[in-house]
Amino acid sequence: MTDVTYCTIDELMAVCLARTIKDHDVVFNGVAVALPFTAIMLAKHTHARNCVFLGGLPAGVDPQPPFLPPTSADAVMLHGAVTILPLHEIFDLAQKGKLDRIFFGGAQIDKYGNLNNTLIGSKEKIKVKLPGGAGASNLSCFAKNFTVWTSRHQVKPADSRKNYTLVEKVDFITTMGHVTPSGTRKEMGLRGGGPDWVITDLGVFDFTASGELRLKTLHPGVTMEELLDNTSFRPVMAEPLGETPLPTREEIELIRRLDPLNVRKREFSASQLERRYPVKN
Amino acid sequence: MLIQFKGFVCFKGWYFLGGFITKGEKIVSLKEAGQIIQDGNIIAVGGALSAREPIALIHEIIRQGKKNLMTIGGAHGLDIDLLCAGGVVGAVQNSFVGFEFDFGLAPNYRRACQSGKVQVRETDCNFTLQQLRAAQYGIPFMPMPRVGGTDILQLHPEFKTITCPFTGEKLTAVPALKPDVAIIHGYKADKRGNVHLTKPYFADVLMATAAEKTIVTVEEVVSEEEIRELGIVIPYYEVTAVVEVPFGAHPTACYPAYAYDRKHIAKYIQLAQEGEEIFRREYLDVFVYGSETQQEYLRRVGDEEHFKRLRAWRQDITSWMEVFGE
């Protein structure tokens, strides 16, 4: 087996994402998925053995894929599934309030947990057309909670003008967080509880009672200066501010076994993957 | 073999008039299938992301130079990107167009949206599913729990907030969306148009049921006995035309026949990233305009060995994994 005395950022983040899943949760993840797929499979093999995994667009229930594919629509995600649902039944479950957790990436994430995956610029003048939110605008309103992640909290040092991922205000709200110009979840009568965790390559955030992003832990070796330098606003800080708990050796071994093609690494740059994090024995 | 006049299409002795198609054989050529689609049509494109997209038919639509089509669907990739490059779409109403973390953004879609050539009508998978459902159920709209706070609503002024007449709860209502034509790639069909799809179905059955007309391309046309044995997922009366096109979803996957062609997609992305002109010259001119038949297309894609590898996924897990390797 590979060296498990240390881990890399993809593995540390997969463990952080997995820990947001509770046993018996019903969990779905749709598109652009390597990291959450890894996390959900990991949770199912560790602390959340009874969670129900609705696996990607193919909508296999509790799949046991022999490897994770780089595309979420592949039939490998049906391998070993208990059954296969029509896609609309996943959304029916969400509408009925039976979806406990879903994972959303964010090209931009603002301080209320609103996500932008639609466009940079404005809808009248689009600078960059992003792929889109898939089912996220609806599911963010229906699911009990969701975990947000980004592998791009760290702004590239070469950029003269920083393109932050964590921004004061997103260019376009694809996915509803806690507070938007049209109001809060409560004011609009939305059924879902909104985002409760944001996991980045620098740290872990939760939310205050008023729905603001709050830094909870920094990843090992990450300084406050580094985090603030890569965030366009000053987030609320938890007291006390801790360090992200270390992954265990067992978790790291499992991740490497569940994702032998290392597709989870594809969203990280080579320099991000060079950084090493300690593992708890 | 195609006669067409207002609202009436006729192939080789069977007829169709805006309702169920219950009579006759439905096998047509790719060219005839393409002619069913009219400029300005709303087309529902089946499959998803890297799976079972009707690529051969999309090539034909581009070759026929259709204008101002609007696509609807969920999370897609190469199909919509290609339609944008071919200049045949005026609006895209999909929920996602991209290549995930494997190859990233869809270059042609992105260019078309940024230049304003294509109207961005980005939506949500569930909005589309509910709109198709309303069309399938024969009702004017579909209510759902309230969707709020998202700017996707600004792109769709046709979606409304309504009050439930029974509970007083605020709900979101979306109008029925009836595609003019659904285009789907299935595994096998018989000549009457009974279709066997392999799972996952994505939104294909919903699209076929909601649409005015449905064109299905398949890997192979087989006997009615065989199709009954395999299981009929879309019955003949929902199907307007069937085209036999081996590797008709290539380079996306059509299990169990073949896995997706990651190598070809990598080449596609590389050329698309190099710009509109290079993509036109080195991809469209070669694989679309320059390949009038599927046979010619496949010849240009690769040799026998190449396609053997795409079919080898089912030998064992190692062979399957190799499809996704470097």
Image: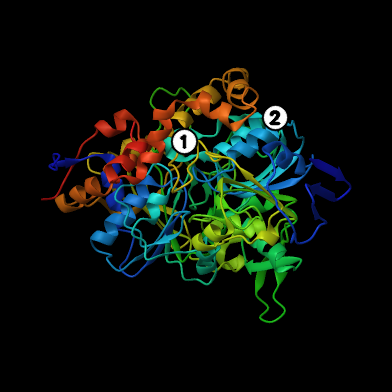
* Residue farthest to the right, as pictured: B6
> Any mark on residue B63, and which?
2
Q: Which residue is mark 1?
A: A164
Q: Is residue A149 left or right of residue B95?
A: left
Quarter holding residue B209 = bottom right
Neighbourhood count class around disc 1 (C-alpha, 10 Å): few under 14, some 14–19, many 20 upward: many
Vertical relation: B13 (above or below) A192 = above
Please provide percent x and percent y for residue B15.
80, 54
Q: Is residue B10 left or right of residue A254?
A: right
Observer-side mark, 1 or 2, equals: 2
Q: Amino acid at mark 1?
A: Tyr
Helix, strand or loop at label 2? It is helix
Quadrant into which the N terminus of chain A falls: top left
Q: Amino acid at mark 2?
A: Arg
Please provide percent x and percent y for residue A198.
39, 51
* Residue farthest to the left, as pictured: A281
Q: Which chain's residue wears label 1?
A: A
